[in-house]
Structures are given as C-alpha cells and as structure tokens.
C-alpha cells in the first residue's frame, strides 16, 4: 500500500509541476491524486471507521484554510471592483526607472503583507501595464514584483497561503512571525532591488500611451476610499480577532465579509440595478479564482493521506539521519519550492514534524515560513504570484531563469543568513 501511495502522489505532483506542457489544469491533477490516494488507503486499510475518522479530521483542517482563502479573495475583489486600489496606485509617480522600481518594490512588499502575494502581484503588474510603455521594462518590473510580493507575504500570517496554513495549524503565532521574519524578508527584497536599480542607472520611464477603452467602471472617491479602508481593516483585524476570541481565522474573515457585504448593500441601495449588480459582493464571489481554491482542497487532502499513513514521519526521520541539520533541511525545502508548488510542500512539512517535537514559533516553523514563502521566487512556476505574473505579462520561463532567478536566489540566501544570525543572537 505504501509504495502505491508514494507512486500515485509522485505522479500527481509531476502532473501539477508540468501543468503547462501537459495542458492539464493542476486543480484536476490535484483532485485525481487526492481521490486515488484516499481510495487506495480505504481499500488497503480494512478499517472503515479509522479511515472515516481520518478523512473527517483532514476535511476540517482543509475547510478552515479554504473558507479563509475564499473570504480574503472575495474582500479583495470587492475593493478592486470599487477601484479601491487607486488609493495607492495613483500616488506612484516618478521619471526614473530605478526610483520607480524602489517605490514599486516597497509598495508591493507592504501591500502583500496586508493582503496576500497573489492579489498584490495582480494589482501591481496591472498597474505597470498602465505606467510603462516598454515591454522589456514591464517584464523586469514583473520579476521584481514577484520577489517583493513573496518576501512581503512571508512575514505576516495573512500574506502568503503557506504562512496562513502554518498559522491556522498552530505552528506559528501572528506576533512572533512578524517579529522574527520582518528583517529577513526585507533583506530578501532589498538585495535584488539594489542590484537591479544599479544595473538600470538613470534610464528614464517610457510612459504607456493613454488609450480610451470606455470599459472603465467609475466609482466615487467616497466609495473607493470606504471600500479600500474597510476591506483592509477587516483583513488586518483577523489576527486580532483570533487572539481575542481564540476562534479560528476563517470565522473572523467570514464575519468581516458579512460586514463588508452589508455596508456595500447600504451604500448602493438607491442605485439602478445594473450598476448595483456590478459592485455587489455577490458579483465578487463569481470573480474569485475557484480553480485555485479547488487546487488547495485537492492537494491538502492528498498530503493528508501521507500524514495518516506515517509516510511523512518516515521521511522526516530519514532527513534528520541523513542531513542532520535543521537549517539545511529547511533551506533545501525552500529551494525545492522553486520547482514545485510550496502549498503541498508546507502541508507535507506540517505532517512530517509534530508540535510536540517542535512547539509553536520554534526555529523550524519560522524558518519554514520564510524559506517556503520566498524560495518560490527563484523560478516563475514556484509561487502563485509568479504564475499570476506569467499569465498577465506572458513571461517566458527561460527569460525569467536568465534575468530574475539569480537575483531571487541572492535575496533568498541573504535573508536566510540574516534569520539564522538573528536566531543565534536573540533566539527563542
């Protein structure tokens, strides 16, 4: 049984990694993998009660992450529908490419920490399409945005889905992860930014020619500001809600979603149906990336089988015996996340190491959040932010390897070094 489970998981994983050449959506591969793994486990186990119990337990853990993601994605869509992000993007103005890159890098870094790296990448790459006329410049900026978004997402519990998973799973707490990873994440972004801006020198910004499409849907300044600050406030309040009530984060995000929905309906209650329909939360629910949500469901359920059959615990033991050093093991996991999706990697790591062995906020979990969150920047397929940028700007995989991968790798190791030094000096 164990051999069959490993083979099916590896094949499903390969299908996810080779999504573009195979022309099969990774969500389909994840769901097929999960279905086959649970089927093999159920037929081989013979203990129906145990399998049902394990499945219920896994479903509960998966549902918490999925509800949280759906809530966060919907809030962001509502803000975007009201042109709420113009509050930030309209303030970015400069004539030198290098200066613009620093501004974009820092805005992306902090916006990603508050929202999430996927959403921030979509917003910032879309903004660059409006600001920059030269495609080469836009590609370079897209690469830097991916690095900055992943770095920014790594140091807060809501900035990256992998950090969110560790936070919901109880491996990290909000205050400690922000305190421990802020400096390493900042260094991870600053190193590539410094190198790139030096290479750019004094090159001017070539602006994009303005085109009147007539498709823009205008909202008042009051509506944009209200939805931006309310949406942002709800996302930022979720960790506080968890700390005060001790309820899981998905409950906080759903509560906030209800508030945003009610406020939206009240603001637009006097408007004609067509305009109201474009701006309501019901429409935002239809715009969220459900294939990404389904992918998380499939991959988390697939990894759960390996956890319940103790395959992951055996791998952890083998790694400890072969490599021995915790920091090297986690660094390797981060590098692997550049090749394959970091969601299943972190899900697997959560199953490999127990909270009894490594309590919340220990070196292993914090360093895991950093490495899995930022290691995905090394290749464009290694993170959700990278895949989004790839789709928006039609970035070639080989171009990214040649132009951006080395910069991302430099940032990755620089940040890792800072975190290790930080732990040695001020460790828990």
Image (cartoon, helix red, strand yellow):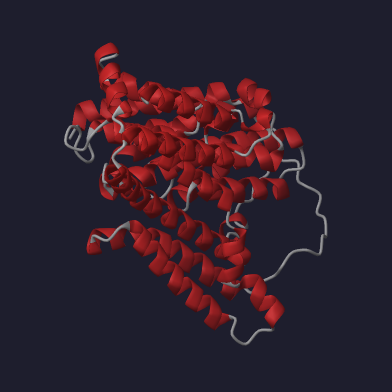
On screen, residue 303 above or below 324 = below
In percent of width and height, residue 75 lies at 50, 62
User: Which residue is depicted at the point 39% across and 36% down?
Assistant: 43
| Near-viewer residue (13 or 200) | 13
In percent of width and height, residue 378 lies at 52, 26
Which of the image's four quarters has the C terminus?
Answer: top left
Left or right placement of residue 340 versus residue 158 in this view: right
Residue 212 sits in quarter: bottom right
Which of the image's four quarters has the N terminus?
Answer: top left
Q: Is residue 96 visible?
A: no
| Near-viewer residue (252 or 240) | 252
Left or right placement of residue 255 versus residue 321 in this view: right
User: Which residue is depicted at the point 27% across and 27% down?
Assistant: 313
Residue 82 sits in quarter: bottom right
Q: Is residue 275 visible?
A: yes
| Near-viewer residue (258 or 33) | 33
User: Which residue is depicted at the point 34% across and 57% down?
Assistant: 249
On screen, residue 306 above or below 255 = above
Outermost residue on the top side: it is 322
User: Which residue is depicted at the point 54% across and 24% down?
Assistant: 407
Count of picture labels:
0
Outermost residue on the bottom side: it is 270
Left or right placement of residue 259 versus residue 404 in this view: left
On screen, residue 321 above or below 356 = above
In percent of width and height, residue 365 lies at 29, 35
| Near-viewer residue (415 or 383) | 383
In percent of width and height, residue 156 lies at 37, 46
């Amino acid at each position: 049984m164990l051999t069959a489970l490993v083979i099916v998981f590896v094949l499903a994983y390969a299908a996810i990694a080779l999504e573009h050449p195979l022309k099969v959506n990774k969500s389909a591969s994840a769901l097929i993998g999960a279905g086959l793994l649970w089927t093999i486990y159920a037929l081989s186990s013979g203990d129906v009660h145990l399998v049902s119990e394990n499945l219920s337990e896994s479903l509960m853990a998966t549902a918490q992450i999925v509800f949280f993601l759906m809530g966060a994605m919907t809030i962001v869509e509502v803000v975007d529908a009201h042109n709420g992000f113009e509050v930030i993007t309209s303030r970015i103005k400069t004539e030198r490419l290098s200066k613009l890159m620093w501004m974009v890098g820092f805005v992306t870094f902090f916006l990603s920490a508050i929202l999430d790296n996927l959403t921030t990448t979509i917003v910032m790459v879309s903004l660059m399409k409006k600001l920059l006329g030269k495609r080469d410049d836009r590609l370079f900026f897209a690469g830097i945005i991916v690095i900055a978004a992943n770095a920014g997402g790594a140091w807060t519990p809501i900035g990256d889905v992998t950090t969110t998973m560790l936070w919901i799973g109880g491996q990290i707490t909000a205050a400690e992860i922000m305190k421990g990873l802020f400096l390493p994440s900042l260094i991870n972004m600053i190193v590539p930014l410094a190198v790139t801006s030096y290479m750019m020198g004094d090159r001017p910004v070539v602006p994009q020619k303005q085109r009147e499409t007539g498709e823009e849907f205008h909202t008042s300044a009051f509506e944009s500001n209200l939805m931006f600050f309310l949406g942002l406030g709800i996302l930022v309040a979720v960790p506080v809600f968890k700390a005060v009530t001790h309820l899981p984060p998905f409950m906080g995000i759903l509560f906030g979603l209800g508030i945003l929905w009610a406020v939206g309906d009240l603001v637009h209650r006097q408007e004609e149906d067509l305009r109201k329909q474009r701006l309501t939360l019901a429409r935002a629910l239809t715009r969220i990336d459900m294939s990404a949500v389904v992918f998380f469901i499939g991959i988390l359920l697939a990894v759960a089988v390996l956890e319940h059959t103790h395959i992951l615990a055996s791998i952890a033991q083998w790694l400890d015996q072969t490599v021995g050093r915790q920091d090297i093991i986690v660094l390797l996991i981060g590098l692997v996340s550049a090749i394959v999706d970091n969601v299943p990697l972190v899900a697997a790591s959560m199953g490999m190491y127990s909270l009894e062995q490594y309590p919340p906020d220990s070196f292993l979990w914090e360093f895991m959040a950093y490495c899995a969150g930022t290691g995905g920047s090394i290749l464009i397929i290694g993170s959700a932010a990278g895949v989004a940028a790839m789709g928006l700007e039609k970035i070639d995989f080989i171009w990214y390897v040649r132009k951006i991968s080395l910069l991302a790798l430099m940032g990755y190791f620089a940040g890792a070094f800072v975190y290790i030094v930080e732990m040695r000096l001020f460790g828990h």
